[in-house]
Image: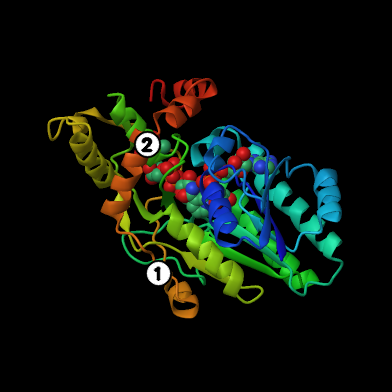
Amino acid sequence: MKKILITGGAGFIGSHVVRRFVKNYPDYEIVNLDKLTYAGNLANLRDIEAYDNYRFIKADIVDAAEMSQLFKRENFDAVIHLAAESHVDRSISDPTAFVMTNVIGTVNLLNAAKDSWKGDYERKRFYHVSTDEVYGALGETGMFTEETAYDPHSPYSASKASSDHFVRAYHDTYGLDTVISNCSNNYGSHHFPEKLIPLAINNIKNELPVPVYGKGENVRDWLWVEDHARAIDVIFHKAASGETYNIGGHNEWKNIDLIRLLCSIMDKKLGREEGASAGLITFVTDRAGHDLRYAIDSTKLQRELGWVPSLQFEEGLEKTVDWYLENEKWLNDVTSGSYQAYYETQYHGR
Ligand code: NAD
Ligand code: TDX
């Protein structure tokens, strides 16, 4: 029996991790803690919310006193920490929110874990979920390995890099059992439509302009979210204390090529003439400090822990489109209200 705190479980990746652990480990007690910001949505977990081994707590990781009381009361065996402000564009308009949640929130959890475990870290674990963006940007060649020096450029990646450093510092200073993974861009169901793929699906569906930053030359390495959740499962159970693993799909796409592929898939699904949706592509002002290319070398994870991605991108993208087309209510619910205001500010006049 293990009692595991998963933070950010109502978000995109967190909901896939919670679902996987609740279903695959009936003898674990899974506690999902989430503030339910604009990005958190309990509808993501409807299918598992009635499971006996699942519980939800609404709380803010920035509240140090609440985190401390919670850990003392619950006596968790492990933490899988995903709660974060996660959107680069929002970090450019409001960096402080990213420092609060991603840096202060992480330190609050580390302190609460350290204090409640009182130096006895046997069979305890603090797993921090991070991003490839901490490594900065690549040119035309090369890949990020676990040895690549940190070089974050956006307020988002700077806040994630800082949180990674704190996690390592708690391992090195206090002996806390920590693991970190740095993953590339995820895609799949339940992805909030402020990020490229779900935003483009939503706009193509509604025949709205599909905004591509700059010339669409930037490259991202895309991984199916359920492959990420499976990697987290493997690392959580098998990694040695203090380890770091990169997670990625060896699946690099220029943004413009990805959007063209998406348009073609959606033309077929929506019964539109081939090429019709590509006419919606609109080049807009580039993101400030836009990292050119990310590419993850996940050889260490494959070699040491035997994880490999399961799904080809074309197949995964088609599955993702199907999910959005079948879950119109989910999409309509999350794009009503404050989403409209965000969209107007982010893209108006761009
Ligand atoms: P998301 O924005 O979809 O979800 C974040 C969740 O955290 C939301 O449910 C939100 O309500 C919650 N949250 C935010 N602030 C909180 C706070 N102060 N207290 C408690 N809960 C709070 O993010 P995501 O895309 O699912 O990313 C999850 C994690 O994975 C993040 O740490 C992110 O940095 C990392 N990551 C994401 C990607 C990606 O492609 N999306 C890739 C690599 C790593
Ligand atoms: O409207 C858009 N047009 C566009 O061209 C948006 C929203 C994005 N883009 C570009 C910017 C990036 O090059 O598409 C690429 C992907 O953008 P995002 O979906 O915002 O993702 P990215 O900035 O790469 O960051 C993501 O991957 C790493 C997640 O949001 C992070 O949480 C994760 O750590």
Looking at the rendered structure, which numbered label has been put on residue 64? none
Q: How is the image coloured?
A: rainbow
Of helix, strand and loop, which one carries label 1?
loop
Name the residue rendered at 79%, 59% in the picture: 113
Give x and y (percent) for residue 195.
Answer: 43, 39
> Which of the two residues, 158 or 1, is positioned nearer the viewer here?
1
Instruction: Look at the picture and state if 103 lies above or below 276.
Output: below
Residue under label 1: 308
Name the residue rendered at 82%, 49% in the picture: 70
Q: Nearer the viewer, mark 2 or mark 1?
A: 2
The answer to whether the residue labelled 2 contacts the one labelled 1, judged by CB atoms less than 8 Å apart, is: no
Amino acid type assigned to the residue bearing label 2 in the image = Tyr
Residue under label 2: 324
Residue 64 vs residue 79: left or right? right
> Which of the two residues, 10 or 88, is positioned nearer the viewer here?
10
Q: Earlier in the sequence, mark 2 or mark 1?
A: 1
Give x and y (percent) for residue 283.
Answer: 29, 32
Where on the picture, by quarter, is residue 238? bottom right
